[in-house]
Image (cartoon, grey):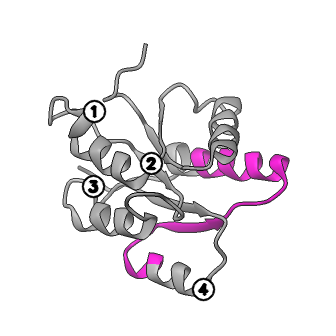
Amino acid sequence: MMTDNEADILVVENDARDAELTLLALEECGLGLRVRHVTDGSEALDYIGSTGVYARDKSAPLPRLILLDLGLHKVGGLQVLQQFKSDPRTRGIPIVVLTSSAIAIERLESYKLGVNSYVIKPTDSKKFAKVVGEIGHYWLTVNEPPPP
């Protein structure tokens, strides 16, 4: 059984349908065993910071990839992105914004804050699953991260 400190991918998504499609796509491409799903920005910050319900050993490994929706409750996606990219512990984790928002200012602000990729969610569920699988495959198996 996976514990809170074993996730390779953190999915930050408040839409239940999109979360289900994302988790299913990761499962289908062989990346679903070590995924943690949180439903809002505050929970994402707690997970990474090992606070709140995610209080655990501070030396626990961080995820290797974060899939981040922008339309989050409590703490917005851009605020989460800003906090992750300004923290030396999480700055190097690839963050892919996976959002329905095609608003240019959000895309521009995401890149200013250091996002690694900005992907607009396809509306077709098969295309959505394909895109998520390709994102996971690229960042976890193709991309060479910087040395620790």
Measured along the vertical axis of the image, is residue 88 above or below residue 114? above
Residue 93 versus residue 126: which sits nearer the camera?
126
Disc 2: which residue = 65
Q: Earlier in the sequence, mark 4 or mark 2?
A: 2
Task: Tell me the element at label 1.
Answer: helix
Q: Position of residue 22 (x, y in %)?
A: 65, 43
Three-letter code for the amino acid on which mark 4 is drawn = Ala
Disc 1: which residue = 53
Disc 3: which residue = 90
Q: Position of residue 39 (x, y in %)?
A: 48, 45
Q: Nearer the viewer, mark 2 or mark 1?
A: 1
Which residue corresponds to the image point at 38% horizontal and 73% vertical from the top-left?
Answer: 114
Q: Earlier in the sequence, mark 4 or mark 1?
A: 1
Quadrant, the N terminus: top left
Q: Marks 4/2: CA distance?
A: 24 Å
Bounds of the magenta segment: 110-137
